[in-house]
Amino acid sequence: MKTVQVLGTGCPKCQSVAENAKQAIEALACDAQVEKVTQLADIAKFGVMSTPALAVDGKVKAAGRVPTVDEIKGWLSE
């Protein structure tokens, strides 16, 4: 099972990232879960300086922007 981490404090853009991740998981029907990381200290552990960000299995794939559903699908398929 893959873990998709949405890194952010809960702003509207962070919510968009989480929604796009859920849509990508549903579209691929893959075994994955979305985890929200909201504490700044935990976000910093990923080396992210700009939110929203998205990581797949602990590897940051996007930071400072909202990735598209198609981008996330590609990362989940790797």
Image: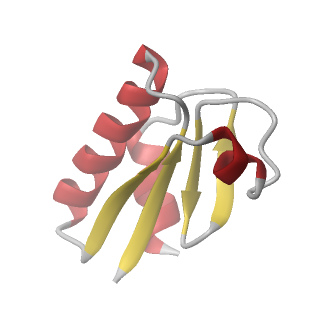
Decide which of 73, 14 is in the foreground and name it. Answer: 14
Residue closest to the eye, 54 or 39 = 39
Picture quarter with the N terminus: bottom left
Q: Position of residue 6 (x, y in %)?
A: 48, 46
Q: Position of residue 45 (x, y in %)?
A: 76, 57
Say which quarter of the image contains residue 62.
top right
Residue at 62% x, 69% y is 58
Q: Residue at 77% across / 48% down in the picture?
A: 44
- Horizontally, residue 13 falls left or right of residue 20, namely right
- In this image, 10 relative to 48: left or right? left
**Where residue 47 appears, x then y in whole percent?**
82, 52
- Residue 67 or residue 57, whichever sits in front: 57
Residue at the extreme top:
12
Colouring convention used in this rendered image of the protein: secondary structure
Residue 28, compared with residue 16, is above or below; it is: below
Residue at left 24%, top 64%?
28
| Residue 55 position in % (x across, y down) | 58, 57
| 16 up-or-down from 42: above or below | above
How many numbered marks does the figure carry? Answer: 0
Q: Is residue 17 left or right of residue 20?
A: right
